[in-house]
Image: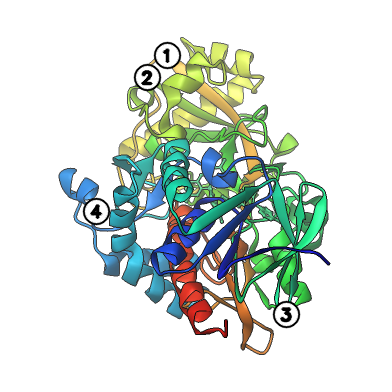
Amino acid sequence: METIGHADVVVAGGGLAGCCAALEAAEHGARVLLLEKCAGLGGTSRISGGAIAFAGTELQQRQQITDSPSRLLEDLRRCAGGQADEKLLAAFVAEQAQTFNWLQHQGVRFSSVQLGSGQSLPRSNRVDAAQMIDALAVNINRHPMIRVMTSCAIRELHEDGVVVDDDGRNGLIKTSAVVLCSGGFSRNEELIRRHAPALARAQRAGASSCTGDGLTIAEARGAALLDMEKLSSTFGRHPAASPDENGLLHPIYKGAVAVNVHGLRFADESQSYKVLGDACLQQPQALVFQIFDHRVMQQSVSDAATSNFAAALADGRVIAADDLDSLALRAGIDAARLRGTINRYNQHAAAGHDPDFGRSSLANGNGTLQPVAQPPYYAYPCTSAILGTYCGLATDTAGRVLDTAGNPVAGLYAAGEITGGFHGNGYMTGSALAKAAVFGRIAGRHAALESAKAPA
Ligand SMILES: Cc1cc2nc3c(=O)[nH]c(=O)nc-3n(C[C@H](O)[C@H](O)[C@H](O)COP(=O)(O)OP(=O)(O)OC[C@H]3O[C@@H](n4cnc5c(N)ncnc54)[C@H](O)[C@@H]3O)c2cc1C
């Protein structure tokens, strides 16, 4: 096969993990080749909600939120139900604060902090995801040690390099270290059927290029897979949302009540949107409505996609009415049952506890229950989606890919959504982007150090 290039480090995939890996490897002296299957950088990271879970940030301090790495660690452990790799969590927590600063230094603008699912206090440091990728891309494009090949997909790993499909032409790129950052497999039906048959009714979301290429390539080299059986869906996507848009809204975490088409609640709405996601799929038509009132609408946040209720109203995705009966009629919900459900919920909210489903807070123990009683009323129809796959390659704390015997696969690293072992049984908002950035940098750095030791 024709050799079409050489690099100390090849990074495959130009989402957040890949951009961070490329920059970090170059900062450690490596000549880097960043391969991206699509015409531009960004992947799912570009269309994400931009909530990044970092603890102890200056943004949190400005909002008088006292967070710490140890509290972040506790939350990650709790969300994972004790099923995450402790060493990965420790490595993440040790580097997350400097990664927040590093991203800022790269020109990524953080705007505000919001409370997210699984967080014991507000920790979703918000970015405009497109701005984040654009800022990193500017630095990548002007870095003398980084070359970018777009419309170029990694296809195979060889002893001495990687085989790529460069816009229809196969070629070998020689290298001693490869960092796989090709994202998840939410857009690969065959892999979803194999690993998550229970999620057949869930929408698919994420960049169309996220078809699990890196996972399949590494598996063929003996890499171990972790957490595949833990794949779950995320609650709160509008049924008409396209796979390539965010489309998530969570008024539940500001006080909305979730009902099915029969007007009946089915869960404690303060739980993780992963738990709610799978519960939603059990409802008729996998369709649920988040019902809220003027008081919740007033808490709309313009720079936080999942809390931007006003924008969803303006887009026609939120249905409005002056009373509950009219709302039910417009949304197609059983009106009498909806009225009964809301009246009952309001009585329980006044008492501070809901004996029906055990809700006692707005989100993960934060905030007190409020009645849904101030017109106008709103309904947000939604379902669940596979947003990310959050399971995959086994890696160690240096980002090295491990085989089924627990040994590193020579010269192979991975970071971001392609990896498993980090989220365990659950998921904390913002932990996917944070993991992509932190482990992208870790893997890039170690790949650069390994390539420096390789014979010329
Ligand atoms: C709608 C939505 C909202 C989300 N919101 C949040 C949020 O607010 N906070 C959060 O933490 N997480 C969020 N997530 C999850 C998060 O966005 C992803 O887990 C994260 O962006 C993954 O980053 P990554 O760099 O690993 O992968 P990606 O960003 O997906 O990048 C992978 C890249 O690899 C490329 N690629 C694929 N195959 C190949 C190949 N063979 N060769 C070369 N390149 C290849 C792809 O084209 C892509 O550019 C959201 C996900 C979705 C779908």
From the top left corner, tell me how far across and down residue 456 is, in percent.
57, 81
The reply to whether callout 4 and callout 1 are in contact (CB within 8 Å) is: no
In this rendering, the answer to whether 77 lies above or below 185 is: below
Query: Is the residue marked 2 within 8 Å of ligand 1, measured from its CB?
Result: no
The reply to whether callout 4 and callout 3 are in contact (CB within 8 Å) is: no
Query: Is the residue marked 3 within 8 Å of ligand 1, measured from its CB?
Result: no
Mark 4 vs 1, N-terminal side: 4
Measured Cα–Cα span from mark 1 to mark 2: 6 Å
Label 1: state its secondary structure. Answer: loop
Q: Which-is-in-front pick, marks 2 and 3?
A: 3
* Residue type indicated by callout 4: Thr
Foreground of the two, 51 or 327: 51
Q: Which residue is mark 1?
A: 376
What residue is drawn where x is 34% and y is 63%?
96
Q: Which residue is mark 3?
A: 159
Looking at the image, can residue 17 be seen? yes
Foreground of the two, 106 or 306: 106
* Residue type indicated by callout 1: Pro
Q: Which residue is mark 4?
A: 57
From the top left corner, tell me how far across and down residue 169 is, in percent.
82, 52
Label 2: state its secondary structure. Answer: helix
Mark 4 vs 3, N-terminal side: 4
What residue is drawn where x is 45% and y is 33%?
305
In this rendering, the answer to whether 63 lies above or below 449 is: above
Measured Cα–Cα span from mark 2 to mark 3: 62 Å
Quadrant assignment for the N terminus = bottom right
Q: Which residue is mark 2?
A: 294
The crowding category of the residue bearing disc 3, from other C-alpha atoms within 10 Å (few below 14, some 14 to 19, many at least 20), is few
Residue 255 found in image quarter: top left
